[in-house]
Amino acid sequence: MENWLTRMARARWLPAWYAGFALYAAGVALFSGLGQDHWWGTWAAGGYAVAAAVALVARRYARGGRGLTAASVGVSVAGALIAPTAWLMATAPNLPDVTVVARSGVLLLHHGTPYLPLAALASGGWLAYNPYLPVMALFGLPGALGVPGGTRPALIVATFLLLYATFRVLRVPRLAALGWAALALSSPIIAFPLTMGITDPPVIALTCLTLALLARRPGPGDARAIHRGLVLGAVVLGVACAMKYTAWPALAVTAVMVARRDGTRAGVTFAGTALGTAAALVVALAPAALRHPAAIVANTVAYPLGLTTAKSPAQSPLPGHLLATLGPGGHLAAIVLLAVAGIAIAASLVLAPPATPAAAAVRIAIGLTALFALCPATRWGYFIYPLALIALAAVERLRRGLPGDGESLEPGGHREQDRPGSLLVSG
């Protein structure tokens, strides 16, 4: 049997992917001005270009190119993530997202809440606001405790470990899972935001891990193992829900999927476990925040919706933001459309509930796309959520199409990926 390096070395898509990544990074470098995005694009374009060349040589030599294939993955991680992150940590240590998370870690450590009080918000400008939920402040603790590097290395390590766990849950062998996780980490949809200290990649990885846990189905007679996977998936998603509101649509869609596939009781158990996990984490980590609910609402609800005096710098020219720039009437229209989109998503779950993790992933991607497009404070970077869900499905489809160490036979002689629980089975 060929191992994963041999199969990747022979694959035509790897050099093409890296070439496409290099073109995207070059576009970022050329058209994003002279800010920090420009520096990521400059570093990453070179890293991806070298990785594409190495992967092309590896494909030519096939079995003899296994070491070169591993090298191409390593080059992409170094060029698109490690090098630009180190550069920006040295030249731009106080990027907005990093500053907010780092401060929330200090506040959590010393005051039991990651949020500034209302009085400080009124005079502190937009950087005084923390739109994240309390668990996100954990990524600010390394800096608060004096650990070198602070927030960005913590985000990178957590994202990589969660991606590795996702592939392992999908029964990808250990070495192959490391390779796939590194490849995913080096892709622009993950490497770019991590380099900038943006907090979405760990939330995305937790969502993907949840779907993988729900896709992996034991034999039909092993009810206890099925229940364990269900509860573990709910706990993982509960952690994401205690980090950022962007995980909440995934909770709604996934709970409905579980209810349709496994029964109403299972769906209620999943939703209750996820919500209970999120609530328990908030109470345990930020008890002082609960005594000031107005500060929580101002930080995590009013500010992202543009209802505060200070406005978010997330202002990409998407429909919601463009409407909000027209004045109070336009802003109200954006909020109304956002509410209508939420109602439409909820209605779709009632009228046509997803039946598999694959269908749930598609529904989450569609729902988040609509919400991001219509939110008054929005940016293009949020679309890494639907892109990452689609990319996970694409990688899993590729793994299924390559026979070898990514497969396993079950007692009945069926390949694991052919079972109804496979992430890519539509429903």
Image (spheres, rainbow, N blue to C red):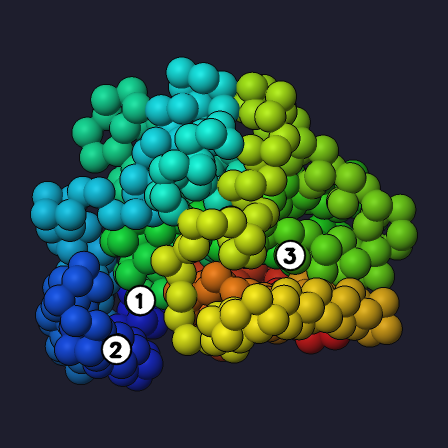
Distance between mark 2 and mark 3 Cα atoms: 28 Å
Labels 2 & 3 near each other (Cβ < 8 A): no
- Judge whether residue 97 can be spotted in this image: yes
Residue wearing tag 2? 24
Residue beneath the point at 16% across and 71% down? 33
Residue beneath the point at 48% across and 45% down? 131
Q: Quadrant of residue 289?
A: top right
**Residue 188's mark?**
1
Going from N to C along the chain, the mark reached first, 2 or 3, is 2
Labels 1 & 2 near each other (Cβ < 8 A): yes
Residue beneath the point at 36% across and 43% down? 125
Q: Is residue 87 above or below residue 60?
A: above
- Judge whether residue 411 can be spotted in this image: no
Q: Badge 1, how many Cα within 10 Å: few under 14, some, many 20+?
A: many
Give how far across and how far down residue 277 sits, in percent.
Answer: 66, 33
Q: Quadrant of residue 79?
A: bottom left
Say which of 30 and 386 sits in front. 30
Q: Badge 3, how many Cα within 10 Å: few under 14, some, many 20+?
A: many
Give how far across and how far down residue 190 sits, in percent.
Answer: 35, 59
**Residue 250's mark?**
3
91 horizontally vs 352: left or right: left
